[in-house]
Image (spheres, rainbow, N blue to C red):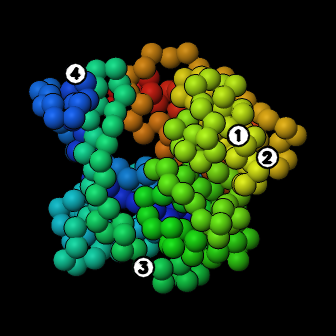
Amino acid sequence: MSTPPCAVVVGSLHYDIVVDAPHRPAAGETVTGTAWRPVFGGKGGNQAAAVVAAGVPCRMVSAVGDDGFGTFLRDRLCAAGVDDRHVATLPGQGSGMSVAIMDAGGDYGAVIVSGTNAAIAPETLDRDALWQGATHLVLQNEIPEALNIAAARAARARGLSVVLNAAPARTLSETFAPLVDILVVNAGEAEALCGVAVDSLDGARTAAVALADRFAVAVVTAGGDGVAAAGAGLDGTRSEPGHKVRLVSTHGAGDCFIGTMVARLVEGHPLTEAIADANLTAARRVSSPR
């Protein structure tokens, strides 16, 4: 029996502590919050779960500690339907975690502590079972770049396409950039990488064109304004306007976009169709209560 097409995510798992507050504190300010809750997180974990939610199998490479956070993360990853056989449990090490403060307008800021995400074993990438049937690899910047490079090389050697969500923003080496087939960034990350301010859909188009000079395909999301893409096979730029929805929370919207886009690509849909579906799914996400 043949293995169905799937995606592989190499990336982070974080135990997120989400705090609701009227606003995010300024320097030296203490704000009284209204509630807090633990949330399954990490861009890698969220994107893997989003791939599965969009109907496509996904395997994950990551690591957790032998602590309560690690148990929580693995349980939630499995509950989401993600194949966790390549997620290691590292004795005596703390799992990755973050604290996110959600303001009354539905926006948030976060601080992450990498923990075991900085200790994912590169040897895991040598397992043939990891790559069987896989067509796309998904990476983010919450793990060391050396591991991203190793994963991208392993994927390329097996004929996979490499998708990088360059978040959080950091300088990408000249070694890594040529290994990326599709770059996905939000407005802030786009500006950090190419210097173009993205405050509209037109700005997203300009940034996508600038980034396509370094990457085969660049996709720039601009929140409620929509998304733009440029690069190989797109015949110039393509864009999708944002969908008008009532904003409840932006938390996880970008990961939802990427997971849905990758799922559609695994299924063989053109990039333009994958982006359009991802744009709609992310809009539904931001308008839904957590």
How far apart are labels 4 and 1 at the CA level?
A: 34 Å
24 or 97, which lies in front?
24
* Residue 22, disc: 4
Q: Secondary structure at mark 2?
A: strand
Instruction: Give the amino acid type for the residue marked by disc 4 in the picture.
Output: Pro
Q: Nearer the viewer, residue 179 or 124?
A: 179
**Dot placed on the residue nearer the N-terminal end, 2 or 3:** 3
Q: What secondary structure is marked by label 3?
A: loop
Residue at position x 25%, y 24% in the image:
23
Horizontal and vertical percent for residue 196? 63, 36
Q: Are marks 2 and 1 in contact (CB under 8 Å)?
A: yes
Q: Quadrant of the N terminus?
A: bottom right
Mark 3 residue crowding within 10 angstroms, few (<14) / some (14–19) / many (20+): some
Q: CA distance from mark 2 to mark 1?
A: 8 Å
Left or right: where 93 falls relative to 134? left
Q: Is residue 243 above or below residue 70?
A: above
Label 4 sits on a secondary structure element that is loop
Task: Please name whichever residue, 145 or 253, is drawn nearer the observer in this view of the structure.
Answer: 145
Which circle, 4 or 3, is nearer the viewer?
4
Amino acid at dot 2: Gly
Numbered disc in front, either 2 or 3: 2
Query: Please, what is the three-letter code of the amino acid marked with disc 1?
Result: Ala
x, y percentage for residue 191?
57, 40
Q: Quadrant of residue 75?
A: bottom left
From mark 2 to mark 3, how far is it between C-alphas? 33 Å
Asked whether the residues under the numbered discs 4 and 3 touch, taking CB atoms below 8 Å apart as contact, a structural biologist would say no
Residue 208 numbered tag: 1
